[in-house]
Image: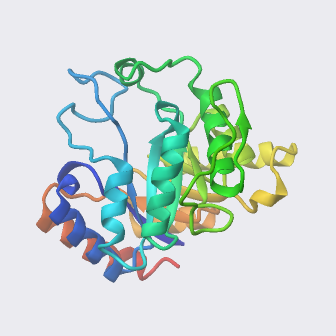
Amino acid sequence: MKFGLFGINNGILADPAIASRTVQAAEAAGFESVWTGEHIVLPDPQVPPSPSAPQTPFADTSTWLAFLAGQCETLKLGTGIIILPQRNPVELAKELATVDVASQGRLLFGVGAGYLEPEFRAMGIRFDDRGARTDEYIDAIKVLWTETNPTFSGDTVRFSGIDAQPRPVQDPHPPIHVGGHSTSALRRAVRRGNGWYGFFVDHEHATTHLKTLAEIEERGGRDAALGRLEISITPLPRATVDDAIRYRDMGVDRLTLLPDARDEDRLMRWIDETAKSMLDQVK
């Protein structure tokens, strides 16, 4: 099993010095990847289902990962997740291809449709068609990343007579990990993703989601060219070694852990303790 560290761009980790030291410590400890979270804006005052206080720092995903690419050598850099329908897919394809080039092929592209209507409203973007646009934007970004003369004609994005440079280092493109718990998100992962990413998923819900993913795939919903669907999960806080073993045994490939720390000293202790208690014991 691989282990990631979630939240490398928010809270105290939106401080560049702390984030830099953290990725270096995580790399030395044996973590495979670090992952951003994303909210471009947050509702103020905080109201459900908003996950964070409005004053929580969230550094921009692409900018932050490009910065961190130069602070480590082997860690994969994951977007966990980019709220895709809020972005211009042509511009985002260039930003993330640049991250993949800067990191020499270490980008993991996590995407989701989003769920905070006030965030969409503040950006002047429709909320009701976010699922369809997420599907279309994934397809468009793949074209921009892989085709010599990229051409795409969809309902919400169209382009032709262009080229898109740089292209990613990874062939055919950085792996796409689709986040979300709804049936439509699980279907999107099977049909368009290289992986599925479940956030704050306990064992019971993991079992249910994995069963649904398998059923969708069995019904012929997956192109063989996508390969095996990789499963990544962020468990509930304070996951134990026994928890990790249960996830591994049910077929989870990666646990992306949320640090239990509110200051840098505690964060560094958490990395060290997690490496000794979990990374070294769960393979």
State the count of labels: 0
Image quarter (top left, top right, bottom left or bottom right) of the N terminus:
bottom right
Could you say which quadrant of the image residue 155 lies in?
top right
Give the camera-side residue of 68 and 275: 68
Judged left or right of residue 6, residue 111 is: right
Colour pattern of the rendering:
rainbow
Could you say which quadrant of the image residue 219 lies in?
top right
Give the camera-side residue of 89 and 115: 89
Judged left or right of residue 233, residue 43 is: left
Question: Which residue is pictured at 73% across the width and 62% down the height?
Answer: 228
Question: Which residue is pictured at 29% across the width and 73% down the height?
Answer: 71
Question: Which residue is pictured at 17% across the width and 54% down the height?
Answer: 12
Q: Position of residue 167 (x, y in %)?
A: 58, 61
Res. 208 in view: no
Q: Position of residue 169 (x, y in %)?
A: 57, 69
Question: Which residue is pictured at 68% across the width and 64% down the height?
Answer: 172
Q: Position of residue 208 (x, y in %)?
A: 64, 44
Give the camera-side residue of 116 and 263: 116
Res. 158 in view: yes
Give the camera-side residue of 249 and 116: 116
Q: Position of residue 106 (x, y in %)?
A: 49, 69
